[in-house]
Amino acid sequence: MNRKDNRILIIILPLILLVCFSVWQLKTTMPMINVESKDGVWDVRGFDFGPTAAALIGDIEYVPGELLTPEEFAASKHIVVGEIPEGTEYLTSRVRILASENRNQYEYAKQNNADEKDAEERRLNRCCLNEVR
């Protein structure tokens, strides 16, 4: 390696390590809520996730040995609810999560604030355009 390559390596390596450490730190500090399924359905109504992550654990609905569309899955007579057995080569699974209407309050509020800001900017731009004309 020449000197230029060494300098690049000296700059890049610490940046890679910093990114790896940041991701590791974020993963280890984020609170986790375990949500257990009941008959293959996860009910998160009433949970206040805030800045937390959810781990969906428990039984799942699946049809072993078949690749199905959602319609075919719903009509299937071979739906199994439980843990997926070792050695299963392929399957179709369905994840059903029950959530309240306001499940995206943060995103909704963020979107509304963005919409209000955009509307305000459009109003200001319209005023400015009217003054220029």
Image (tube, rainbow, N blue to C red):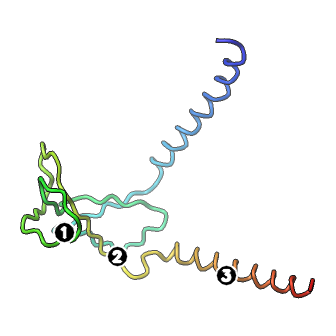
- 43 lies above or below 55: below
Which disc number belongs to residue 38?
1
Residue 15 as seen in the image, left or right of residue 92? right
**Residue tagged 2:** 99
> In x, y percent, where is residue 36?
24, 64
Q: Amino acid at mark 3?
A: Glu
First-in-chain label (1 vs 2): 1
Q: Quadrant of the N terminus?
A: top right
Q: Nearer the viewer, mark 1 or mark 3?
A: 3
Residue farthest top in this picture: 1
Q: Could you give the CA–CA distance between mark 1 and mark 3, rounded to whole angstroms?
A: 40 Å
Q: Position of residue 53 (x, y in %)?
A: 41, 60
Q: Residue at x 17, y 63 (%)?
A: 61
Query: Looking at the picture, how far across and down is residue 12, in whole percent?
Result: 63, 29
Q: As drawn, is 22 to the left or to the right of 90? A: right
Q: Is residue 76 left or right of residue 69?
A: left
Residue designated by label 3: 116
Mark 2 residue type: Ala
Give the residue drawn at x 33%, y 58%: 55
Name the element at disc 2.
Answer: loop
Q: Residue at position x 76%, y 79% from top?
A: 121
Where is 89 relative to 95, above or below?
above
**What amino acid is found at the position of numbered circle 1 in the picture?**
Lys
Compared with 20, 9 (above or below) is: above
Spot occupied by residue 22 in the image (x, y as percentages of width and height): 55, 43
- For the residues labelled 2 and 3, the Cα–Cα distance comes to 27 Å
Q: Nearer the viewer, residue 126 or 48?
A: 126
Label 3: how many residues lie within 10 Å, few (<14), some (14-19) or many (20+)? Answer: few
The numbered mark, 2 or 3, whose residue comes first in the sequence reads 2
